[in-house]
Amino acid sequence: MSKIILTGDRPTGRLHIGHYVGSLRNRVELQNSGAYDKVFVMIADAQALTDNADNPEKVRQNIAQVALDYLSCGLDPEKSVIFIQSQVSELTELTFFYMNLVTVQRLQRNPTVKQEMILRGFSENEGEENQNKRGVPTGFFTYPISQAADITAFKATTVPVGEDQEPMIEQTREIVRKFNATYGPVLVEPEILLPGNAACLRLPGTDGKAKMSKSLGNCIYLSDSSEEVRAKVKGMFTDPNHLRVEDPGKVENNPVFTYLDAFCKPEHFEQFGDCFHGRKSSFDFHSLDEVKAQYRAGGLGDVMVKNFLAEVLDATLAPIRARRAELEKDIPYVFEVLRKGSDEARRVAAQTLAEVKQAMRINYFDEDVLASLIADFNGRK
Ligand code: ATP
Ligand code: MG
């Protein structure tokens, strides 16, 4: 069986370092590994509209931003099909058929959707984010089904995403099993591929909130300038009880250390070790474990650790930023990539949709089918 990847992002903003470690970095490696027959990467504009129906301009503007983030991180249109969800209308048809295989109760149990509803003020649950309760758009409530359509349309075997997507992949697997058992073996059950590094599963926000998210405004964007990155790191939440430098500090749930876990490489100590040389105290660290041990023991200030983190992040983002600046000079090329990708995606999805309709026996006008429908009717008269 071929090995196929499908993954994507909502164009609700530029992509941030959470996307990078949670999915994008992994995707580029998988694309270049040669281990996959096809890689599909989708800009999920239709899904973004499920909770941004009144702001289509935001979604529209961010299509090019997300495509630029992709290309500048190393997604290569020669190796990956990069496409726009709304341009593949077959996905909507599949969604409509899959809706019959999922109960409302099952959708209500999805923990990620529950959390996102609270965050967006759609939920009945109590919470301070809920001052302006709005009803839940039906499209938003059913987006896990649409995501199943996206994955299965390409017969994806592997979906590299962040941890918050686990319930979506489980929902997809259930739909596949139900469809195949009811209509015949057409669809492929996908596997989730999570980042290997625990810090990358769900990168926290700069404010210490559990998830860095475009919708929460607690992000360091891949396209942020060096100055912006430094200013954001400087203002980051750390251990609130680490008041004086000599106090012992906590590394757990301290986003500065989580980011270091996600980004720091051994060579960074050689390159940026100077950050730990101050007037009052000076350290020669060779590994992150040594930094953590000193922070826990006390005597290591947040400023030093933050300066080091800013260097590490900037070193990671500098080449991405440079590629973006080049690509921004040729936006027509970026849209051409998306157009070609969308054409190719449509061809593949149309083939799956034809198989789905055949299995469901709603392909009335296919050659032999019409003749047998007429014969059936006449035979029963
Ligand atoms: P929105 O707030 O609009 O939902 P988002 O920031 O959650 O945006 P998505 O487009 O929903 O981003 O997610 C795209 C991919 O990035 C998914 O695979 C998701 O798991 C992953 N991802 C998003 N945020 C993080 C994060 N903070 N840490 C790790 N992975 C993340
Ligand atoms: Mg999200």
Image (cartoon, grey):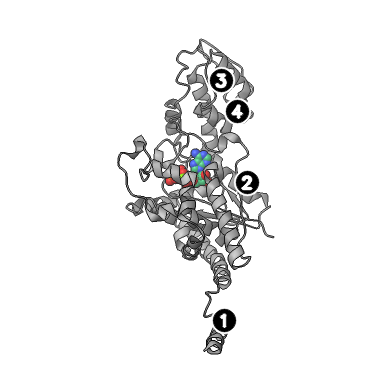
Residue 268 is marked as 4
Q: How many other residues sit within 10 Å of disc 1, few (<14), some (14-19) or many (≥20)? A: some
Q: Nearer the viewer, residue 193 or 66?
A: 193
Compare marks 2 and 1 and give the one earlier in the sequence.
2
Q: How many other residues sit within 10 Å of disc 2, few (<14), some (14-19) or many (≥20)? A: few
Q: Residue at x 44, y 42 (%)?
A: 115
Q: Residue at x 63, y 29 (%)?
A: 267
Q: Residue at x 51, y 20 (%)?
A: 304
Residue linked to disc 1 = 369
Residue positioned most to the front: 381
**Between marks 4 and 2 in the image, the one whose residue lies nearer the viewer:** 2
Q: How many other residues sit within 10 Å of disc 4, few (<14), some (14-19) or many (≥20)? A: some
Q: Label 2, label 1: how many angstroms apart (C-alpha)?
A: 45 Å
Residue linked to disc 2 = 29
Circle 3 SS class: helix
Compare marks 4 and 2 and give the one earlier in the sequence.
2
Identity, as a three-letter code, of the amino acid under mark 4:
His
Q: Label 2, label 3: how many angstroms apart (C-alpha)?
A: 31 Å
**Between marks 2 and 3 in the image, the one whose residue lies nearer the viewer:** 2
